[in-house]
Image (tube, rainbow, N blue to C red):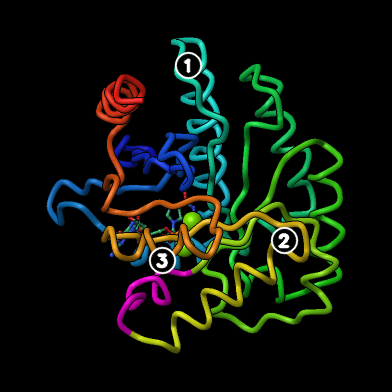
Amino acid sequence: LEHGELCLHFQPQFAIDDRRLIGAEALLRWQHPELGMVSPNEFIPIAEESGLILPIGEWALRLAVRQMRAWQDAGLSLQSMAVNLSAVQFRQSNLTQVVSRILDEEGMPAQFLELELTESVAMDNPLAAIETMDKLRTRGVRMSIDDFGTGYSSMSYLKRFRVHKLKIDRSFVADLAADPDDEAIVTATISLAHALGLQTVAEGVESEAQLTFLRGKGCDEAQGYLFSKPLPAAQFEAFARASSLLL
Ligand code: C2E
Ligand code: MG
Ligand code: MG
């Protein structure tokens, strides 16, 4: 963070029915001078252990909100900027104040921000999670459950989590159109979400066959290499302009 070696890449998210670009997920990148690009899967767990995830996470949140504001000012019609929250951040007692201050200072309405939590983060201390989710929701921020289906989720808590979307983990999406069990799990997840009034996003969509399956089951949104890898900000902007011309 001090050396300016962290940056954010942005992965486009699409509405499945009309292939319209609707938002972005901000993903951390560490460009190390000797090690090259270090994966967030490697450095985020270490940052969590050391507590450094708090300043890093706050930095990422602010930058993502600032970028979203800049893109809206530049005329891109994006509806949401999704930012991943780590367990340590989510347990921070003043999280709502931190998020609120960043939105105020960057001049962005709360409804454009979506915070992603993994199932295990939410289930770690479900009652505290419900309280935090309620506060964020009251502030107007949307939340989604990331990597849904890979953790230990309790249906009774899912009902009480005030989230907006379930993100279907890419391990289930990967074998769609090949593995009947994964097809059953994805189909059931979409029905469950819709029955609870939640939207669904499929992660890691890489093929037209997967997209066709998801469309057939009524999945709302998709992101994945089929559309685009996560991109640096300038490339995301060019991608967004090009995709709006195609409509
Ligand atoms: P995630 O939030 O589930 O992000 C999705 C991951 O899947 C990203 O990996 C993305 O690059 C990758 N991906 C997207 N589409 C495809 C596809 O079609 N095929 C395949 N094979 N992969 C795809 P990435 O960027 O390496 O991030 C890994 C994880 O690190 C994220 O998983 C998230 O849990 C965590 N992470 C990233 N940025 C942040 C952050 O700012 N804060 C926190 N707390 N965690 C972050
Ligand atoms: Mg995510
Ligand atoms: Mg995920």
Q: Looking at the image, which residue is at 45% across and 79% down?
A: 183
Predominant SS of the magenta segment? loop
Q: Give the side of residue 127 with respect to residue 90, left or right.
A: right
Q: Mark 1 points at which residue?
A: 70
Q: Quadrant of residue 124?
A: bottom right
Q: Give the side of residue 243 with respect to residue 190, left or right.
A: left
Kindly indicate whether the residue at mark 3 contacts the one at mark 1 (C-beta within 8 angstroms).
no
Q: Looking at the image, which residue is at 86% across and 52% down?
A: 134
Residue 205 is covered by the magenta coloring:
no
Residue nearest the observer in this picture, 23 or 33: 23
Q: Give the side of residue 45 with respect to residue 38, left or right.
A: right
Residue nearest the observer in this picture, 98 or 160: 160
Q: Which stretch appears magenta?
A: 169-178
Residue nearest the observer in this picture, 36 or 220: 220
Q: How busy is the neighbourhood of tag 1: few (under 14 within 10 Å), some, or many (20 plus)? A: some
- Picture coordinates of residue 79, whole percent (x, y): 57, 30
